[in-house]
Image (cartoon, rainbow, N blue to C red):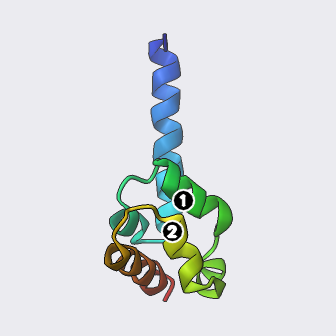
Amino acid sequence: MLQKKDFESYVQAQLNFQSILDQLFSLYSTVLGQVFSRTSLEVLRKYPTPERVIAIKHIEIVEMIHTGWLTVNQTVFQGLLDDTE
């Protein structure tokens, strides 16, 4: 079980991460929703910079984001591209 100090450190790490992410991808949490979800973290792992997002193929990101709705996936992809501008 997490101790209060450990929990506070965990929360602070998430806030620091969110702050850095906001500087790189200002709309990331808006586009992908839960920043710390498995899908979101996988997108960040594979495409850690705006330049990498711009360079990816559309189908690659659509296949990675498993929402089951192609139109939603396309919207997410377009949102990521728009955020890099």
Q: Is residue 45 left or right of residue 70?
A: right
13 or 57, nearer to the observer: 57
Q: Quadrant of residue 79?
A: bottom left
Q: Is residue 54 left or right of residue 4?
A: right
Q: Which mark is residue 23?
A: 2
Give coordinates of residue 3: x percent, y percent: 48, 12
Q: Is residue 31 above or below residue 42?
A: below
Q: Which mark is residue 6?
A: none
The local secondary structure at tag 1 comes to helix
7 or 29, nearer to the observer: 29
54 or 24, nearer to the observer: 54
Residue at 45% x, 34% y: name it. 11
The local secondary structure at tag 2 comes to helix
| Kind of residue at badge 2 | Gln
Residue at 45% x, 79% y: name it. 77
Tell me how far mark 1 sits from mark 2, CA to CA: 5 Å
| Kind of residue at badge 1 | Ile
Give coordinates of residue 5: x percent, y percent: 50, 17
Q: Is residue 60 left or right of residue 18?
A: right
Residue identified by numbered label 1: 20
Give coordinates of residue 72: x percent, y percent: 33, 74
Residue 16 can be seen in this image: yes
Disc 1: CA contacts within 10 A as few (<14), some (14-19) or many (>=20) = few
Asked if marks 1 and 2 touch (Cβ < 8 Å), the reply is yes
